[in-house]
Amino acid sequence: MSTSSPLSTDGTALERARAVIRWFIGVAARKQTYTNMGYLFLSFPLGIGYFTVLVTGFAIPFGLLFSLIQIARNDPVALLIAGIPIALVIVCLGIPVAFCTLVAAIELSALERRLADRLLGTDISTADPATGLREWATRVVTDRSTWKGVGYLFSKFVLGMASFIVLVLGGTVTYALIAAPLHYQNQLVGIHLGDPIKFVPELTYQHDGWIIDIAPITLSIADGELISLYVDSLPTALAVSAFGVVVGLVVLHLFNAAAWLLARYADLLLRNAQPSIVSEPPEL
């Protein structure tokens, strides 16, 4: 029976520590980090666009149907007069608009799959193309993947806003810390929570009039609100800037983690969905 020596154990632990450090620092040099950031950035405008298309498309048929229901509830006699024209409008206009909206949802879901595959490195599978126009039209309405795609596109509105907030907040805080030596003597420049965000560390915490001084950084406590962190010397500003580099690396890892979660979410809801009719038209 052989046993490993302490030196070999220490060597293995040291190698692991170096690997972790390289992984932590190397996030700034990896291409995938910036493609992930690109995906997070695009999520915001795309989410707004998806939400606008779907709400506009579904508002017409559901609005007409709601009007018909209201007339039937309030005045059954009026339903005989206005119900038939509204029903005809629903059949001639509402149903085609709803169908086209579902087709648009399929195409937008296909766009999301491509973005996830290209930027996040996923490989989301799609269903086989329909064998005919009739099967394709039936699948547009009845296939579960269509409605999962609609739900995904609606949720993209919230996810896009969250991604934008994460990017802006992480980038702003990181820049403010790293740029501390450029503005450390300017009391008008700082990070203010509750006030407009500015650039350089100025931190004040207030609670019941308590004041805590930690030279060369002053912390004030009153009212229970974090206000600012102010640095008033160049050595401290350089230290804050170095700390900002570490924070920036942590922020990049957080961006990657957020992108990984979005990739898993996209794969969960868009897997085996119908292919784009533009790239893979149904067989005739």
Image (cartoon, rainbow, N blue to C red):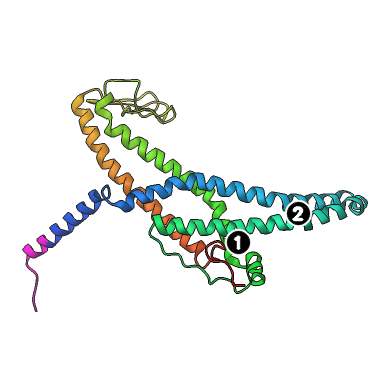
Q: Is residue 164 above or below residue 151?
A: above
Tell me, yes or no, whether the highlighted magenta stretch contains residue 4: yes
The image position of residue 271, as x and y in percent, is 49, 65
Q: Which residue is mark 1?
A: 147
Can you name the residue that lies furthest to the right here? 77
Secondary element at image label 2? helix
Q: Relative to 170, is 65 on the left or the right?
A: right
Which residue is drawn at the image coordinates 47% and 45% (left, top)? 162
Disc 1 marks a residue whose amino acid type is Trp
Residue 248: quadrant of the picture = top left
The image position of residue 37, as x and y in percent, is 38, 47
Q: How many marks?
A: 2
Work out how far the residue at label 2 is from the one at label 1, CA to CA, in angstroms: 21 Å
Residue 123: quadrant of the picture = bottom left
- Residue 79 seen in render: yes
Can you name the residue that lies furthest to the bottom here? 1
Disc 2 marks a residue whose amino acid type is Leu
Q: Nearer the viewer, residue 59 or 106?
A: 106
Q: Quadrant of the C terminus?
A: bottom right
Q: Quadrant of the N terminus?
A: bottom left
Q: Is residue 143 above or below residue 71?
A: below
- Residue 213 seen in render: no
Q: In the rendered structure, find residue 93 and report the number of the disc placed on it.
A: 2
Q: Relative to 248, is 198 on the left or the right?
A: right
Give the crowd class for mark 2: few <14, some 14-19, many >=20 residues within 10 Å.
some
**Mark 2 or mark 1: whose residue is earlier in sequence:** 2
Q: Is residue 6 above or below residue 50?
A: below
Tell me, yes or no, whether the highlighted magenta stretch contains residue 198: no
Residue bounds of the magenta highlight? 1-11
Which residue is drawn at the image coordinates 20% and 52% (left, top)? 22
Give the crowd class for mark 1: few <14, some 14-19, many >=20 residues within 10 Å.
some
Q: Relative to 268, is 29 on the left or the right?
A: left
